[in-house]
Structures are given as C-alpha cells and as structure tokens.
Amino acid sequence: MWGKILGALFGLALFRLPGLVLGIMVGHWFDKAYSQQFEKNGGFNSLFSEKTDEQALFRYTTFATMGHIAKAMGVVTAAHIQQATHFMAQLDLTAEQQKEAQAAFRDGKLVSFPLRQQLQAFYQVYRRRKDVLQIFLEIQISTACAQGKMRDEQYLLLQQVAGYLNVSSVQLERLIQAFGSHNRQQQTNSKLSISDAYRVLGVDADINETGLKRAYRKLMSQHHPDKLIAQGVPKEMLEVAKQRTQDIQAAYELLKRHRSN
C-alpha cells in the first residue's frame, strides 16, 4: 500500500497526471514484490527469531569445535569427554539442549567435519562482535587444556580456529597464557602469583597504573553478561564469562596490593 501512495505522490510531483498513473503502477509492483519477500522470510516472526538463530549457531559451533579439538590427537580421551560433560553441566542446559550439544560434539569429532566452513559461517554472523569471538576462543582453549597440558596438535588447530575468526596469533597467545595461569592455580590449589596475575590481564609487568586500570576495565567490559547477551551469546553460556570475570578481578586486586607496597 505504501509503495502505491509514495509512487503516486512522487509521480504527481514530477509529471503531473501521467506521473500519478505511472507512480501508482510502479508502487503496486513494489508492494507486491516486498510482500512476497516478506512472506518468504517468515514475516514478523523472522525478526524475532533472528536472535534465536544466532544463539543456536553459537551453541552448535561451540560444541562441534570442542569435539574437533578433542579429536586433534586422533582419539578423544576420557578427560575431554569429562571436560565437555562438565561444561554442559555448568551451563544448566535443558534435556533437549544437552542432546543437541552432544550431537554437535559428535559431529565435530568426525574427520570429515567441515571446520573451516562452519567457522566462516560463524564469523560472518559475529565478525563485528570481538567480545563474542573472544569468549568462543576461551571455551576452545579450555577444551585443549582438559588434560592439564595443551598438545602440539591442539595448539596448531587452535591457531587455525583463530585464523578463521580473524584473531591474531598475539591475541591467541595472551588468551592461552591467561587460561594457563588459571589452570595451574586450580590444579595446585595455590594462590595466584604476581606473574600469573599479569598474564591474566594480558599485560607486561612494566605497565603503568593507568595502563593497568585500562586493561582491567576493558576485560571486565568484554565479559559483562548484559553486553554479551545483547551481542548474541546464549544466556546459558555466560558461566564462562562469569568465571573469567572472577579471575580478572582477583588478578587486578592482587596487583593493586602488590604495587602499593
């Protein structure tokens, strides 16, 4: 309808009566074409389901890539299965979501799994949301470190994953070091060391106070739940961000105390 109205107005203004008739005809064609395309895309429902589709893509790609990284050494170990199961339990998935996650994990273990194509599709949706890409990589790093130490095959695969997501090798290395510090602390049940605290924040020990605070605030912002949900991260995935936030805060508080002495 609006196509005919606007067409008529523009046609009348430009060519008087002949333009009015022509404008109505062109507007009618536009309305018809738009209506067909609107119905083809699912009408208003498609607008509301877009975010749901993004979250489904995030879930599937996350667990399929986990499966692929677990299989990198040729066999999926009990530690990797336990890591995936523990992660699913942390997310408090519904029974249906658990089945979907397990199916995605199995898909990723297949030699024929199209990792590159899957990650490229994932990147096309989330390419402007760097914080989401970082959370995704942190999950994959935790899978690679499931046995306590990352294997060379898994490291090379993580480099490929980062490359497909346009994440630099420097940024990937910082994320690996940050997670390694957290992993060592958990395994030894010891307090966070000063050197590990710097790694968690992704900064060098000679950084000034302003730079340290800026790095801390940036990391906290990147892992803020409300921000991640708005960017398309499924709500149940926020447990990863919550744990990372606790590590970031603990590291920053430790460094503040250390520097004030």
Image (cartoon, helix red, strand yellow):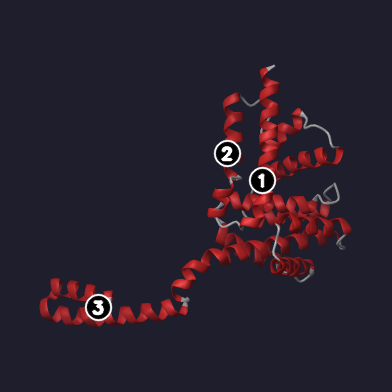
Task: Tell us which disc is closer to us: 3 or 1.
Answer: 1
Q: Residue at x 76, y 65 (%)?
A: 105
Q: Residue at x 56, y 65 (%)?
A: 52
Q: Which residue position holds label 1? A: 242
> Which quarter of the rendering shows the N terminus?
bottom left
How far apart in space, not on screen, are marks 2 and 1 (Cα)?
A: 15 Å
Q: How far across and how far down the image is residue 239, in percent?
A: 68, 50
Is disc 2 surrounded by few (<14), some (14 to 19) or many (20+) residues within 10 Å?
few
Labelled pair 2, 1 in contact (Cβ < 8 Å): no
Q: Which amino acid does the dot numbered 1 rest on?
A: Lys
Label 2: element kind = helix
In the displayed structure, does residue 184 sit left or right of residue 207? right
Examine the image and state in which quarter residue 207 appears: top right
Q: Residue at x 52, y 68 (%)?
A: 49
> Which quarter of the rendering shows the C terminus?
top right
Q: Which residue position holds label 3? A: 4
- State whether residue 205 appears in this view: no
Mark 2 vs 1, N-terminal side? 2
Q: Residue 23, relative to residue 215: is it above or below? A: below
How far apart in space, not on screen, are marks 2 and 3 (Cα)?
A: 50 Å
Mark 2 vs 3, N-terminal side? 3
Task: Tell us which disc is closer to us: 2 or 1.
Answer: 1
Q: How far across and how far down the image is residue 45, in percent?
A: 48, 72
Number of on-image labels: 3
Q: Which residue position holds label 2? A: 218
